[in-house]
Amino acid sequence: MKFNRLSSLAAGILIATSISGAVYFLGDSGSPSKAVEKPTETKVKAELSDTEMKDKLTASGYIVQKKEDYDKSIATAKADGQKAAADKKIVYRAVIGVSQGMTSIDVGKMLEKGKIIKGSAYQFSKAVEKKKVENKLRPGTFIVDSDMSNDEIIAAIFK
């Protein structure tokens, strides 16, 4: 019977795997290590009292506080953040392009789509008619924002 090199390699791998598996599964893994353990820095720190640990941390620049104080400060910060978010007012800004032949309703629709006016395009058109400037629409490009009143927007685009 003639063995080739590949069969020899496979047999060697099989034997090595078997020996490694036997050592792994049958080895004495439950006994304590024979190596002598040196005291490490973490073990020394574990023997410190609470006040000594707090003093060392404070001296190193850390802030040490109780869990109740930490939870209270987190709750206060969240409440302040929510209050600040509620106090913020969102202002929308839009560039309006007015061309020849547009009407006040067309302008109102653009302003409504850009969230510049609070009411509808129809209400904006009625405000323009009330000021009697519906025929004085100026072609051009205008920058308006939601912080402006309807009268300011009308004054910027019409006349």
Image (cartoon, rainbow, N blue to C red):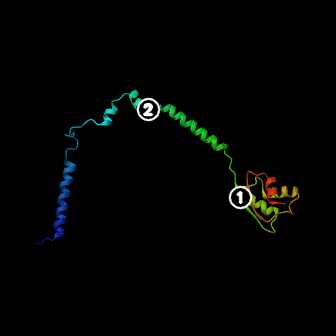
Give the CA separation, mark 1 to mark 2: 53 Å
Instruction: Identify the image quadrant of the N terminus.
Output: bottom left
What is the x, y in percent for residue 56? 40, 31
Kindly indicate the quadrant of the structure image that contains residue 54.
top left
Which residue does the numbered mark 1 point to in the structure image?
94
Q: Amino acid at mark 2?
A: Thr
What is the x, y in percent for residue 149? 78, 51
Query: Residue 58 — which label?
Result: 2
Residue shown at 57% from the left, 36% from the top: 76
Q: 57 or 22: nearer the eye?
A: 57
Residue shown at 19% from the left, 61% from the top: 13
Q: Amino acid at mark 1?
A: Ala
Q: 114 or 157: nearer the eye?
A: 157
Residue shown at 82% from the left, 53% from the top: 151
Kindly indicate the quadrant of the structure image that contains residue 121.
bottom right
Q: Counting other residues with Cα less than 10 Å from the Cα at mark 1, is it few (<14), some (14-19), or many (20 or more)? A: some
Instruction: Identify the image quadrant of the C terminus.
Output: bottom right
What is the x, y in percent for residue 82? 61, 41
Instruction: Please state if 66 lies on the left or on the right of 48 as rendered.
Output: right
What is the x, y in percent for residue 68? 50, 31
Residue shown at 35% from the left, 29% from the top: 48
- Disc 1 vs disc 2: which is toward the camera? 2
What element does badge 2 sit on?
A: helix
Instruction: Please state if 55 lies on the left or on the right of 106 as rendered.
Output: left
Kindly indicate the quadrant of the structure image that contains residue 116.
bottom right
Instruction: Please state if 102 lies on the left or on the right of 36 as rendered.
Output: right
Q: Counting other residues with Cα less than 10 Å from the Cα at mark 2, is it few (<14), some (14-19), or many (20 or more)? A: few
Instruction: Please state if 62 lies on the left or on the right of 95 as rendered.
Output: left
- From what the image shows, is residue 150 above or below residue 31? below
